[in-house]
């Protein structure tokens, strides 16, 4: 997975996309989340004060996911 790079295909994503980036995520730094959101048409970036997969702040993650899914 470390060398798997699909960034060139991100512009083809048509599904409504929520990118959640954690401010303390060392596995997927916030800059990577910003890059993903910028490359996917119409994507929304939500930043949470947490690490990888936002497990330190599940309430904020849940709120972001529910808002995205109910939209």
Image (spheres, grey):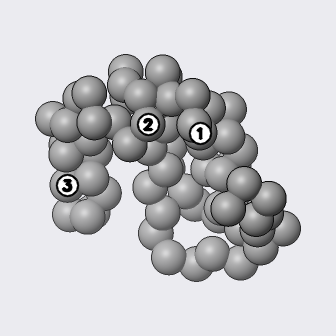
Q: Is residue 24 above or below residue 31?
A: above
Considering the image in quadrants, where does the N terminus appear?
A: bottom right
Q: Compute the Cα span from label 3 to label 2.
A: 19 Å
Q: Could you tell me if the residues under marks 1 and 2 are in contact, i.e. CB atoms within 8 Å?
A: yes
Residue 11 position in % (x across, y down):
74, 69
Q: Which structural element holds mark 2?
A: helix
Say left or right for 51 vs 64: right
Q: Which structural element holds mark 3?
A: helix
Residue 42 at least partly seen:
yes
Say left or right for 64 vs 15: left
Q: Residue furthest left?
A: 59
The residue carrying mark 1 is 28
Of the numbered discs in the image, which one, if any, rests on residue 16?
none
Q: Could you tell me if the residues under marks 3 and 1 are in contact, i.e. CB atoms within 8 Å?
A: no
Residue 60 position in % (x across, y down):
23, 34
Q: Quadrant of residue 55?
A: top left
Q: Is residue 41 above or below residue 60?
A: below
Say left or right for 13 vs 24: right
Considering the image in quadrants, where does the C terminus appear?
A: bottom left
The residue carrying mark 2 is 52
Say which label, 3 or 2, has the lower sequence index. Answer: 2
Of the numbered discs in the image, which one, if any, rests on residue 66?
3
> Which residue is at a point 58% across and 60% down the rendered structure image?
42
Q: Could you tell me if the residues under marks 3 and 2 are in contact, i.e. CB atoms within 8 Å?
A: no
Q: Is residue 12 above or below residue 6?
A: below
């Amino acid at each position: 997975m470390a060398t798997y790079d699909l960034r060139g295909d991100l512009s083809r994503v048509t599904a409504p996309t929520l990118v959640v980036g954690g401010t303390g995520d060392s596995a997927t730094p916030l800059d990577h989340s910003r890059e993903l959101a910028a490359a996917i048409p119409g994507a929304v970036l939500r930043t949470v004060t947490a690490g990888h997969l936002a497990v330190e702040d599940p309430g904020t993650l849940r709120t972001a996911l529910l808002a995205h899914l109910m939209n």
